[in-house]
Image: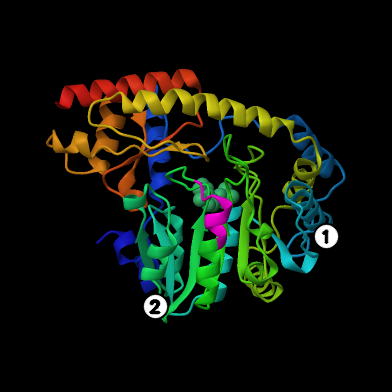
Amino acid sequence: MSETLAFPRSTRVSQMQPSSTLAVVQAALRLRAAGIEIIDLGAGEPDFPTPDHIKRAAHAALQEDFTRYTPASGIKELKEAIIERLAEDYGIDYSPAQVMATAGGKQAIFNAIVTLINPGDEVLIPSPYWVTFPEIVAFAGGQSVFIDTEPTDFQLTVDSLEAHLTPRAKLLILNSPCNPTGRTIPPERFRQLVEKAVEHGLYVMSDECYREFVYPPMKPFCAGQLPPELRSRVLIVGTLSKTYAMTGWRLGYALGPEPWITEMIKVQSHSTSNPNSITQKAAIAALRGPQEPLIGMLEEYERRRDFLIPALNDIPGVSCLWPEGAFYAFPDIRGVLERSSLNSSIEVQRRLLEEYHVAVTAGAAFGSDGHLRISYANSLEALEKGVERLRAFVERLS
Ligand SMILES: Cc1ncc(COP(=O)(O)O)c(C=O)c1O
């Protein structure tokens, strides 16, 4: 028996699946290491470099030997910078005790779920969903209850939310703009959904990691703009990963009810402690510095989206809704599957990578096997090539 199989994994961890989105990245890297040119439409991260003024702040922090432990929830100046940014962008007000910095949005989500969910509690998750949500819910012993949004064009409705509420439901997760669909909940619908959840005694976690990535005429919306009686049940998760092209730096944050944040800080203080000290200084520069780099990135993503969606819809058997935010397209490929011997999006993902050297992510990873997730956080040139190869692949199948 191999050493791995003999390892007596805990029950919780043996139920956890490795991150399938990261798995695509690894598979693509392996091929690349073998000298093969890969069109990477799998990665969920900006293809832009971190802006220079942010990098300079990190250099300065190193020079100043800002290299020691900080408070587990981040330094005061960083919390103030997070609060100021949200105040300026959304006219909302949070106190430092309602804020914590984390090692990426992912850690904020982990802290939030494990501090709220007991074994048997239900967590309502609109589907398709970001892969990590149900894994953390299961890790906490909770039960994910998926709400299929496909019949309503990937938009969660108040009626379908209501139909899934049970006395055991404790948390609703909203993710707008959504990874993987790019669909974005309009503010009024957002309010109605939170109102319904709160009416039934639920808490809400609003994953706003793509909050700034919405395209006109949509405008960014933050759950902090909700009326106070709703806001007091809502935890906001944000990140600098996407907004400032800082995925590797690892800086996210949570804002919400003070008692919830207090428990989350307790968990963090016994797990990772503070987010990286240098990154915290860089994050202050990102939040307080010029916001123009983001505008440039947004315009570029919009240009790519405007190319990608019509190009996908032009491939026989493929149909794709128009994403209002994030940088993902989520085309329906059931028309392709039906006309071929392929049974699942995972097979399409594997064959596209191996035979056509295009990395995409199977919809199955997000709870929707009839789809693919295509990231347009890559150059227009790469997108053009990727679509061309996808078309060639589909045409060969039929
Ligand atoms: C929906 C969603 N939430 C949270 C995250 C976490 O990002 P990070 O931990 O890099 O801040 C991601 C990253 O891909 C995401 O797609």
Disc 1 marks a residue whose amino acid type is Lys
Q: So how many labels did they put on this image?
A: 2
Q: Residue 166: which disc?
A: 2
What secondary structure do most residues of the magenta stretch adopt? helix
Q: Which residues are magenta?
A: 184-191
Q: Residues within 10 Å of mark 1 (few under 14, many from 20)?
A: some
In the rendered image, is residue 9 in sight?
A: no
**Residue at image x 77%, y 69%?**
97
Residue nearest the observer in this picture, 373 or 198: 198
Residue nearest the observer in this picture, 315 or 258: 315
Residue 175 location in percent, x, y? 51, 54
Q: Which residue is mark 1?
A: 76
**Residue at image x 25%, y 20%?**
392
Disc 2 marks a residue whose amino acid type is Thr
Judge from the rendering whether residue 371 lies leftward or rightward of residue 394; answer left or right: right
Q: Residues within 10 Å of mark 2 (few under 14, many from 20)?
A: few
